[in-house]
Amino acid sequence: MLKLDFHPAGRHFLQIPGPSPVPDRILRAMSYPTIDHRGPEFGELGLKVLEGIKQIFKTVHPVVIYPASGTGAWEAALCNTLSSGDEVLMFETGHFATLWQKMALSLGLKPQFIGRPGIEGWRGGVDAQMIEDHLRADGGHRIKAVCVVHNETSTGVTSDIASVRKAIDAAGHPALLLVDTISGLASADYRHDEWGVDVTVSGSQKGLMLPPGISFNALSPKAIEASKSAGLPRSFWAWDEIIEMNKTGYWPYTPNTNLLYGLSEALDMILGEGLDNVFIRHNRLAKACRTAVTAWGLDIQCADPSVYSPVLTGVMTPEGIDADQVRKTIYERFDMSLGTGLGKMKGRMFRIGHLGDCNDLMLMATLTGCEMGLQMAGVKLQSSGVLAAMDYLGGQSVPLRRD
Amino acid sequence: MLKLDFHPAGRHFLQIPGPSPVPDRILRAMSYPTIDHRGPEFGELGLKVLEGIKQIFKTVHPVVIYPASGTGAWEAALCNTLSSGDEVLMFETGHFATLWQKMALSLGLKPQFIGRPGIEGWRGGVDAQMIEDHLRADGGHRIKAVCVVHNETSTGVTSDIASVRKAIDAAGHPALLLVDTISGLASADYRHDEWGVDVTVSGSQKGLMLPPGISFNALSPKAIEASKSAGLPRSFWAWDEIIEMNKTGYWPYTPNTNLLYGLSEALDMILGEGLDNVFIRHNRLAKACRTAVTAWGLDIQCADPSVYSPVLTGVMTPEGIDADQVRKTIYERFDMSLGTGLGKMKGRMFRIGHLGDCNDLMLMATLTGCEMGLQMAGVKLQSSGVLAAMDYLGGQSVPLRRD
Amino acid sequence: MLKLDFHPAGRHFLQIPGPSPVPDRILRAMSYPTIDHRGPEFGELGLKVLEGIKQIFKTVHPVVIYPASGTGAWEAALCNTLSSGDEVLMFETGHFATLWQKMALSLGLKPQFIGRPGIEGWRGGVDAQMIEDHLRADGGHRIKAVCVVHNETSTGVTSDIASVRKAIDAAGHPALLLVDTISGLASADYRHDEWGVDVTVSGSQKGLMLPPGISFNALSPKAIEASKSAGLPRSFWAWDEIIEMNKTGYWPYTPNTNLLYGLSEALDMILGEGLDNVFIRHNRLAKACRTAVTAWGLDIQCADPSVYSPVLTGVMTPEGIDADQVRKTIYERFDMSLGTGLGKMKGRMFRIGHLGDCNDLMLMATLTGCEMGLQMAGVKLQSSGVLAAMDYLGGQSVPLRRD
Amino acid sequence: MLKLDFHPAGRHFLQIPGPSPVPDRILRAMSYPTIDHRGPEFGELGLKVLEGIKQIFKTVHPVVIYPASGTGAWEAALCNTLSSGDEVLMFETGHFATLWQKMALSLGLKPQFIGRPGIEGWRGGVDAQMIEDHLRADGGHRIKAVCVVHNETSTGVTSDIASVRKAIDAAGHPALLLVDTISGLASADYRHDEWGVDVTVSGSQKGLMLPPGISFNALSPKAIEASKSAGLPRSFWAWDEIIEMNKTGYWPYTPNTNLLYGLSEALDMILGEGLDNVFIRHNRLAKACRTAVTAWGLDIQCADPSVYSPVLTGVMTPEGIDADQVRKTIYERFDMSLGTGLGKMKGRMFRIGHLGDCNDLMLMATLTGCEMGLQMAGVKLQSSGVLAAMDYLGGQSVPLRRD
């Protein structure tokens, strides 16, 4: 019976906050035969994806596509704009902000890592006022860049990037604004140009619905200018040659051809649905998910409703309940993967991804799995989150079941 | 917003009682390059699937595989064993039994179509006593075959085939026993040899998890003997040449190569999970589904619990509710396909498929879609079937939600 | 070394006259998820393929698509138009004409099987004059149908169908004209309406580039009229109900959904290339192939240049050389499948398929494999067919190699 | 007719020296659903590929797999072992050696770029004696690494790596030996441990038959030791954390999951065929290709038979013939991609890839396309290379064609 319970049949539910489920349509596109990356068809493909991805970032400036996963694009953003020993102001919103800061250290930068202390710091977004205060205090403009995470995948918080730009401007500080929206792009609204971002970092395996393996740097003219004098050594990540060759749709070295096929298809899907519709859908599913968590009587990791993430929801487990044990039960009994608590949150929360190629019934399946799993793990639920979510999604109340 | 509601994203839920969702693993197998059906590799494939499919039918005798969909295998069963003008005793369990009887008429046979009258006749299984009575009354043995449907796809009833064989034997009648288990095979237990069936008819797009396009006749020695004198004209469906060539793994004409790749994979999956485990899984999901229907306060189409189908559940809608309108709402709002009411049941019921590559969360998604859709259509539900099904599947009660 | 010689790597060359190599594009289309064959999307698919296939047959009348392989469509053509005991005039062009005649016998028809005697009869096309003579002699109009094969797959002969219609008309005979172009459709020009054909039979696995599994009957109004009084029993093959339901894009029973996806893609490919371009390409490759055979000093099975097939070329081996041994050598050493000699031609010829998704270099690979294989088998070649074919395809002479 | 000549049908021949044609089997494996890279199944996959890839490199030490294309692995090799300002001795074998040297400059290293002058330098392999001489002259051991290319993709030369190690040892020099075998691995014999290489760099899109997107660093204990004090900044490329997490089959950041599925399949294919058989096959095809070039009377770019590449053959065009015009003709008329002349060789040669998933008839198709294309471009050929290659592959002479 245990074996039966670890369902050998049916579809696995991959409800982590990325990689998100890759639609069959994209997997099929990725199976087109690999072509000559120096041949004429490739150039057409290159120009198409380079143009299309700009619409996703909402930019008219170059977007660099790397044949490397997202962490590489973090490094690219830093090494193209900064020099050894440069100070950077980074904001601790969660685990990934922490890892980016760790990378900055490894590369020989000097990060100031600010934020609110303890777990509470991981329950909200970037505090633009704190950034402004720090920049005002930096009269000598030793801080060369402000680095923030737009959608913090470890917590389910989507920070207000426009406010960060306003803070930098208010402080009259020349620092560059570098933003990680690896998990936010194409799920949460993002506006590279309008928000005045200098480098936006993103990846493929989240809202773009691709497997991991390609990543992005969206640039501003100011960032490109900075790259001309930035001193960190770089070659693979260097923007200049890529931007130059991208003009005709090619890359200086071998690109990740089959993932570019997938990107082309993803762009067709997303722009076909309409970016705004994509955001409405994500917001609706996220709201339904939070409705369920609230009905269960559990805390949402993000404590500030103004920055709830449309991508994922962090669910805190009650004292004495190991969130990873809940995840394990759900995995074994219901063949569903949920995100673990990272860093400070290890064992205290799990994360439900509702991004990318997701719809109402996939979310409802997810919530039923969570509800059954929480109960199996001994969590006392205040009420059925599944019923609450159905109320929200279906828009009409269900009479309660008689027992 | 309407367009949004008809979710353009995420996976469609195909919850009709066949075609069932085809697992990616099978779709991949079907994409192997087509090979020479007279070459050496083909023979190995042929022998493998011909041997494996016997295990699914639980027979040691030949199983004929047709490159044609299931309706063709119905015709094959009749035209290989019978002659023009022959009487056949057929039992009305629902729409598909009715269609088979109609086919018998078209082929020049004389069916006696017995059963219980009206809708009630479509809410139970085959009545073996009625069959025995008819056979006893046929002193001249003009009835050459008894034809029954094992799993009636239009109603969700799985008849007791062993009892039909007993009835025939009890009447001391020489009629052949022909059984349609197109939608039952590999989901409901089936025993061709043990139950004394002469010809079993089945198809690919149900429990075998394949697309439609191949179909089966499992034979008994008595059926093969009958085919030698059967007078109905036949060529494509003729067993003799196929059985002969199948000995080396080939077919007399071009087989459906890529679906045979799929069949090979399906056999690996089913026999890998274990036929008994497959049946336990289907029974468990069917029980959960019926638990939901009962909690809703709706009638299950099958009125006899001893013959509930593990493959599908027929749900009767209350007076004044058009079941097809409910289906339409669910399709448009939740991107899920359910089965329509067929023949006598048009507009009065819908059918939930839970067969093949299905698991707990896929079923729960289905039930949430049904529950929301029923309410949108104005059906008053007694209680939440979703909660009831979670109780059953999760094995533990959820406290009710506070409103 | 033997194992190495049976190349474990690289692409197999499937150069039999069908199934032809299935393009990846079609395999991908066939991997779309199976949908509800009663749902709204299906109807659109159905209407599209039903309309598109008419363009391939060059008809404005209904084309019936069967979820069954080509042999079934032969049976359908006969049983929808004829009655038990009807006489049919069939012309022996080769093995498949012989098999169709055998089927007619099995179905209780009375075929007159005419043709030229011996192997010579298999080296040319249909002799319209012989048909006219037979029809003139049939004053009582007992012959109800004339059955001929357009492209005889066993020999590589493409008969002149228009001449057969002229012969029937010249004889003033009311017999129906039934034509098998299973291997000719979409490779050789074919004109159902213009040529006055009553039923055209075809299949999927040749010029349409699909795996086997669906087949066709293109009809004339006269054939439809005949079907109303035809006496042969039929149900699965019956046109009437299919034609009726096809009006909205559906089928009376479960169609072969995933092969219809493939058909939809194949129609896009063929009509996108342009039917005339498809024919030009086939003729060009066929000519190159025959040029090679002639250079080798071997006989082309088709002895009449006016009916050379654009689909395949039959190559006769010299006295004392077993053609199947040549094929075996080529298969084992060069991983290429060629067609065997069938019936009367067993061991005396092999068949090279150059149909469907074929191009210059695929054909050249094929010819190099044949040339090497023939030499290994001890055949004395007059000259290099490969050079001759390159001359033809490349349009310029290559100086001979110094030895 | 021009449009026809740019064949719209049939398979494209991708005969560049990488990316090589990706077998369907690998494309299918890459279409498995993306899974949680922190879940239990992933760890099993990770351990399998990490273990398997060691067999390909013939090493017992760690092999780092990067989710980035090959150029990144070049950077990884340098930045993990060296410090800013370090001298490295690099050998100019061709375009890729030149690019690696350019990268070293970008990263702040000081390359000594030695080699034979002019085009002649690009027609042979690494001269171990020159390396030994340079190292002997470097009494202060300022040279920290010797960097050579094993299989120079731009020329078709496979250098003797063992001799380079011997040279270093003979000079008693402590420099590390870094080797690029991006295009050699799994096609040409390679022995990381036996040859005493410290870091071997490779990629996925050549002998491993995968699309581009993952790349490799195989390490020696000495290289790992060097990485502890190497001063170049690095994070994404840093070995230490990857090696640590790889112990359980995971990566510190998101790996390229679907390409790892492909790698797993590629390992099964290569180790299933047997590495030695893979090498024999490549050598045989390369020999056949060179036989053709010689018969044409054209020069092979590699002028030293002892270092002919089994991966690709560079073909020099006669004075006055633009090699890229020949390539264009072949591309447009025969739908085949060949490699262009790079750097110094631009327009003077083209490259024929015969690596990865290649077999006799694929090569023969390639050679027929080349022969026809060369003639169309006005190149006077001495004799037919196609005939010569068939002689070699088929092992028997073909009588010449009569004209």
Image (spheres, coloured by chain):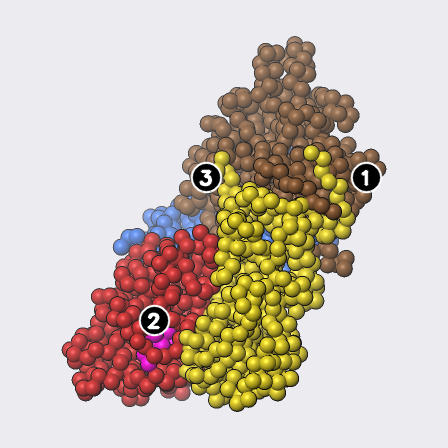
Chain colours: A yellow, B brown, C blue, D red
- Vertical side of B149 occupied by A320: above or below: below
Which element carries disc 3, helix, strand or loop? Answer: helix
Of residues B324 and C156, the one nearer the viewer is B324
Residue A21 horizontal/vertical position (percent) = 56, 57
Q: Which residue is mark 2?
A: D201
Q: What residue is at 58 percent from the left and 39 percent from the top?
A: B394
Q: Which residue is mark 3?
A: B272
Of residues C1 and B367, the one nearer the viewer is B367
- Tag 3: amino acid: Gly
> Residue D77 in magenta?
yes
Which element carries disc 2, helix, strand or loop? Answer: strand
Residue A257 horizontal/vertical position (percent) = 49, 69
Marks 1/3: CA distance? 43 Å
Q: Is residue A114 visible?
A: yes
> Residue C341 in magenta?
no
- Tag 2: amino acid: Val
Q: Which residue is mark 1?
A: B321
- Tag 1: amino acid: Ile
Q: Which residues are magenta?
A: D75-83
Q: What residue is at 64 percent from the left and 84 percent from the top?
A: A170
Labels 2 & 3 near each other (Cβ < 8 A): no
